[in-house]
Image (cartoon, helix red, strand yellow):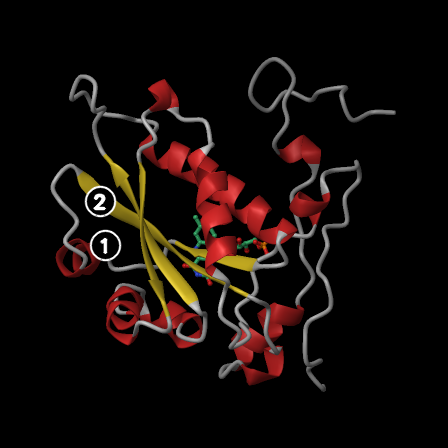
């Protein structure tokens, strides 16, 4: 099978209308060589900055590296597991997402910290899509290596990584599974698998016509 140069849009096949920047977002592994304009990167972090967080703690911290800075880029890339490094090395921007573990206001454990990082990433991803960028999040990192190599202080830990850039040609991906995934259909659970009425696992009428 011939792999198309640029995977056609993988816009979500929604049953109800949603915002374009949500429907059009997906997670490619093929990145173009084109760098991301600093102004666009600034907009991504502005979007992340305005995410909600428990007690407005804003527990997220982002260690960013761009390809034009080979040393920091290699350091961040080295924190990813091999399977992720194999494709993420082509992205023009990589970052490691860290979170604080306790509230600055009282030193108590913040059980919302990774949740709130997720909200910031949701904002960043939606903004990126609206700007024509693609984002691929990764849980596959070596958290201990990130802690040591990136100088992450106590009270913080690395949680995930992100590749950011412009979509590239799937045919340039080095491994079969990566090219296959690029072309694969997107799927999601049916509503009755995750929206319940009044108690867990109880059906809801909400989606019945
Ligand atoms: C927190 C998180 C961790 C993920 N970890 C990885 C990863 O380590 N490697 C990878 O290739 N994709 C990873 N993904 C991407 C998911 O596989 C992808 O989002 C999911 O299959 C849904 O596809 P879509 O984003 O294209 O809708 C991760 C996504 C999230 C949100």
* Image quarter of the C terminus: top right
Is the C-beta separation of discs 1 and 2 under 8 Å? yes
Q: Crowdedness of circle 2 by 10 Å Cα count: few (<14), some, many (20+)?
A: some
Residue 94 lies left or right of residue 44; in this view the side is left
Residue 190 percent location from the top left of the image: 69, 39
Residue 106 percent location from the top left of the image: 17, 17
Where disc 1 sits, the SS reads helix
**Residue with the mark numbered 2:** 157
**Residue with the mark numbered 1:** 143
Residue 82 lies left or right of residue 149; in this view the side is right
Answer with mark 1 or mark 2, whichever residue precedes in sequence. Answer: 1
Which residue is at 57% across, 15% downward? 199
Residue furthest to the bottom: 2
- 128 shown above or below 86: above
Residue 39 percent location from the top left of the image: 49, 54
Which residue is at 52% across, 57% downward? 135
- 142 shown above or below 20: below
Query: Ligand 1: does it lie within 8 Å of the C-beta at label 2?
Result: no
Spatial distance from mark 1 to mark 2, Cα to Cα? 7 Å
């Amino acid at each position: 099978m011939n792999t198309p140069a640029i995977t056609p849009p993988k816009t979500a096949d929604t049953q109800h209308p949603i915002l374009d920047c949500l429907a059009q977002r997906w997670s490619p592994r093929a990145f173009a060589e084109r760098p991301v304009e600093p102004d666009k990167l600034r907009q991504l972090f502005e979007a992340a900055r305005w995410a909600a967080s428990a007690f407005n703690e804003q527990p997220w911290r982002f260690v960013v590296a761009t390809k034009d800075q080979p040393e920091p880029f290699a350091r961040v890339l080295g924190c990813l597991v091999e399977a992720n490094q194999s494709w993420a090395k082509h992205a023009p921007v990589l970052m490691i997402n860290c979170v604080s573990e306790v509230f600055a206001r009282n030193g108590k454990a913040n059980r919302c910290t990774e949740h709130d990082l997720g909200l910031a990433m949701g904002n960043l991803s939606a903004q990126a899509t609206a700007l024509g960028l693609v984002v691929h999040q990764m849980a596959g990192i070596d958290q201990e290596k990130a802690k040591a190599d990136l100088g992450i202080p106590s009270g913080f830990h690395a949680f995930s990584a992100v590749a950011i850039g412009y979509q590239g040609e799937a045919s340039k991906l080095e491994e079969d599974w990566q090219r296959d995934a690029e072309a694969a259909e997107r799927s999601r659970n049916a509503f009755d698998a995750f929206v319940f009425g009044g108690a867990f696992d109880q059906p809801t009428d909400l989606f019945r016509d």
